[in-house]
Amino acid sequence: MIKKQAEKISKWKELNTFFKKRRKSPLDHPEFLIYFVLVIFGFGAIGIWSSLYIENYENVYNHSNIVHNIASFAIAIISAGSIELMFVENKYIKNPLFLISISTIIASVFIFFATLKIGGPMAYLLAIPFGIFSLYIWWIANAENANLTKNYFNEQSNTVEGLMNNVNDYE
């Protein structure tokens, strides 16, 4: 019994450490931040930005268009992030992360339809936190994505340096 309690506590502690580390680690990688802002928040939310522009340009606010765009953006980003979390290689927390990911996707479907059902300005109270949460999930899921956090400059410098050494050795 005590061993099971210790395992539960340590898994919770391990999950906490996992999330804390992934919240902070991307801040050391400007390429991750640029990708996050430009691609995910910028181009990924193009439906939100275009509906805001149209609503503002025509001076006729149709809240349902903006809310629908926020909700559809959020569910797409949450799904991508949650699926990415399912492939984390940490064997100790793999199963809890899988369950968290599945639960997050299922809850997101309900929240998505709830935002559509509520409609009007009140739907923003659900849609905006939903959108922010989706960005958080994506951030956590991709925090250690090698394509977004790799230091290409140092890697290329090392490759060139290695080639130079090989050429010098050849001479």
Image (spheres, rainbow, N blue to C red):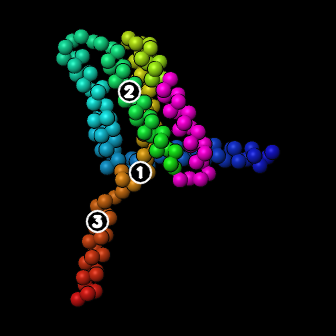
Seen from the viewer's position, the closer of residues 56 and 82 is 82
| Residue 130: image location, x then y, percent | 44, 26
| Residue 53: image location, x then y, percent | 22, 22
What type is the residue that disc 3 sits on?
Gln
Q: Which residue is mark 1?
A: 145
Q: Residue furthest right?
A: 1
Is residue 27 visible in the rendered structure shown here? yes
Compared to residue 133, the image places residue 19 above or below, namely below
What residue sits 32% from the left and 20% below the top?
66
What type is the residue that disc 1 sits on?
Asn
Seen from the viewer's position, the closer of residues 102 and 20 is 102
Q: Residues within 10 Å of mark 3 (few under 14, many from 20)?
A: few
Magenta span of residues: 89-110
Q: CA distance from mark 3 to mark 2?
A: 39 Å
Q: How many marks?
A: 3
Q: Which residue is mark 3?
A: 156
Q: Is residue 79 magenta?
A: no
Q: Which residue is mark 2?
A: 72
Seen from the viewer's position, the closer of residues 89 and 41 is 89
Residue 21: give its label: none
Compared to residue 64, the image places residue 91 above or below, namely below
Quarter of the picture containing the C terminus is: bottom left
| Residue 89: image location, x then y, percent | 53, 53
Q: CA distance from mark 1 to mark 2?
A: 24 Å
Q: Residues within 10 Å of mark 2 (few under 14, many from 20)?
A: many
Secondary structure state at the residue bearing disc 2 = helix
What residue sits 24% from the left and 25% below the top?
50
Q: Earlier in the sequence, mark 3 or mark 2?
A: 2
What type is the residue that disc 2 sits on?
Ser
